Image: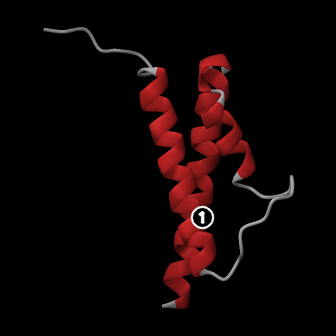
Amino acid sequence: MPSARRGGTALEKRRLIERAVVTMRQMLAQVGIPPSRIAADPVIDPQTTAVGIERRTDDHVKAALLDAADMIRILRVIVDGKE
């Protein structure tokens, strides 16, 4: 029986975060919030994490994924409420 890998590869982590960023951008557009290039944009942090994934600690990546999941849950509630 193969042993379970912990955490996955850098590529897998990057793809998860990048997919979360795409999902967040799409959902923000659905609720009428345009993309922003300022530091207050909630998508900037996960994007930055994805770009430098090789230099991030597992805890940093975990925090970025949890933050992205939280935002997606919140946006899902808002999107569902608009329908």
Give the labeled residue for mark 1: 25
Number of dots carrying numbers: 1
Q: Residue at x 54, y 79 (%)?
A: 79
Q: Could you tell me which quadrant the N terminus lies in?
A: top left
Outermost residue to the left: 1
Q: In this picture, is 17 found above or below 22? A: above
> Could you tell me residue 10's position as x and y percent?
49, 22
Q: In this picture, is 34 found above or below 8? A: below
Q: In this picture, is 33 found above or below 50? A: below
Crowd class of label 1 (few under 14; some 14 to 19; many from 20; radius 10 Å): some
> Could you tell me residue 75's position as x and y percent?
59, 69
Left or right: residue 20 versus residue 61 is left
> Could you tell me residue 15's position as x and y percent?
46, 38
Q: Tell me the quarter of the picture where residue 31 sits.
A: bottom right
Q: Which amino acid type is shown beneath numbered disc 1?
A: Arg
- How is the model colour-coded? secondary structure
Q: Residue at x 79, y 58 (%)?
A: 41
Mark 1, secondary structure of its residue: helix
Q: Residue at x 46, y 40 (%)?
A: 16
> Could you tell me residue 68's position as x and y percent?
60, 49
Left or right: residue 78 versus residue 16 is right
Outermost residue to the right: 39
Q: Residue at x 34, y 15 (%)?
A: 5
Q: Tell me the quarter of the picture where residue 54 sits.
A: top right
Outermost residue to the bottom: 83
